[in-house]
Amino acid sequence: MEKKVLITGATGATGKNATANLLAQQIPVRALVHKQDERSDQLKNLGAEIVEGDLTDLDAMTQALQGITSAYFVYPIQVPGILDATAYFIQAAIEAKVGHIVNMSQRTSRRESPSHGAQNHWISERLFDYSGIPVTHLRPTLFAEWLQYFSAEIKHNNRLLTPFTEARYAMVAGEDTGRVISTVIAQPEGHLGQTYELYGPEELTQLEVSQILSEELGKTISYVPMDAGSFGEVLKANQFTPYFIQHAEGITKDFNEGFSNGMNDNIEKITGRKPLSIRDYIRQNINLFN
């Protein structure tokens, strides 16, 4: 049977890059999106088959997975529902006889996590493990794309305002994670049943990130620490869900206690390329911050 891949979250930071990489290798891709817009049009122009659907709709997942040999599953941390979505995805994948699933989890996923979202990602991993379908779990540290949440403060007030006061971690870009996804799907040998923690190329404090921003933007960006509760109030004011706010406050505790520390070269080992540095990411997305 010819390989055909379902990419969920296909217009997101990881999904769009995985889709483009697979299509460049002449591997057919069905891209699942919430709605068709200019982002899905870009994928369609690359050769992807575009389908609309919701991960919490069993019938939609059953239809989306028909004829699929490998699939990428990602569920947004901003909203609840990952466990229902995982169960529906597994059932539909079993019925469709999918041979391999790549699951996007996160570095903070574990049974004892203070974040309900991270706990649920850990449960989601276990459900995939119990399914009998070969699965590869990816656990990236905080995405470089998280800087976008703080871009307005950086752009207008010349400050980086985050709660990760004591944290030191290696942010990873969606571009690199997308390349891992496409590589593991295209060449699954040795990756089935594995869990990979994914890191960027350098551990940085928030002060060091603000210094890099200053150098790249040509103006002083000050790091202004804040506590988790104040961060939660900022998220609430910006209409994030209570579920995501609880997650953000939970991982803030993890990060400030050193849980995010560490490095590895998994991205380079898997893809053959070094990951983007945070400086590279800022340069590529300079208009977000300047």
Image (cartoon, rainbow, N blue to C red):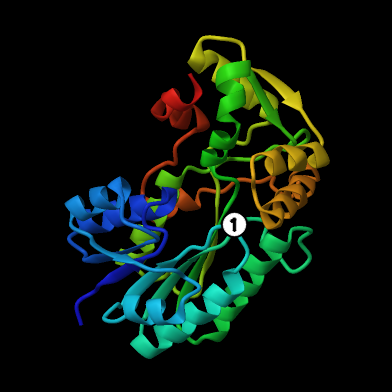
Position in image of residue 260 (x %, y %):
69, 47
Whether residue 187 is visible here, answered yes or no, is: no
Whether residue 188 is visible here, answered yes or no, is: yes
> Looking at the image, which is closer to me, 276 or 91?
91
Position in image of residue 54 (x %, y %):
44, 69
Secondary structure, mark 1, is loop
> Looking at the image, which is closer to me, 44 or 54?
54
- The residue at 51%/48% (across/down) is 265
Q: Is 77 on the left-hand or right-hand side of 255?
A: left
Position in image of residue 35 (x %, y %):
36, 58
> Looking at the image, which is closer to me, 195 or 122?
122
Q: Is 156 on the left-hand or right-hand side of 231?
A: left
Q: Quadrant of residue 68?
A: bottom left
Amino acid marked by disc 1:
Ile
Position in image of residue 157 (x %, y %):
63, 17
Q: Is residue 45 above or below residue 54?
A: above
Q: Residue at label 1?
A: 77
Most extreme residue toward the bottom is 95
- The residue at 60%/49% (across/down) is 141
Q: Quadrant of residue 48?
A: bottom left
Q: Quadrant of residue 230?
A: top right
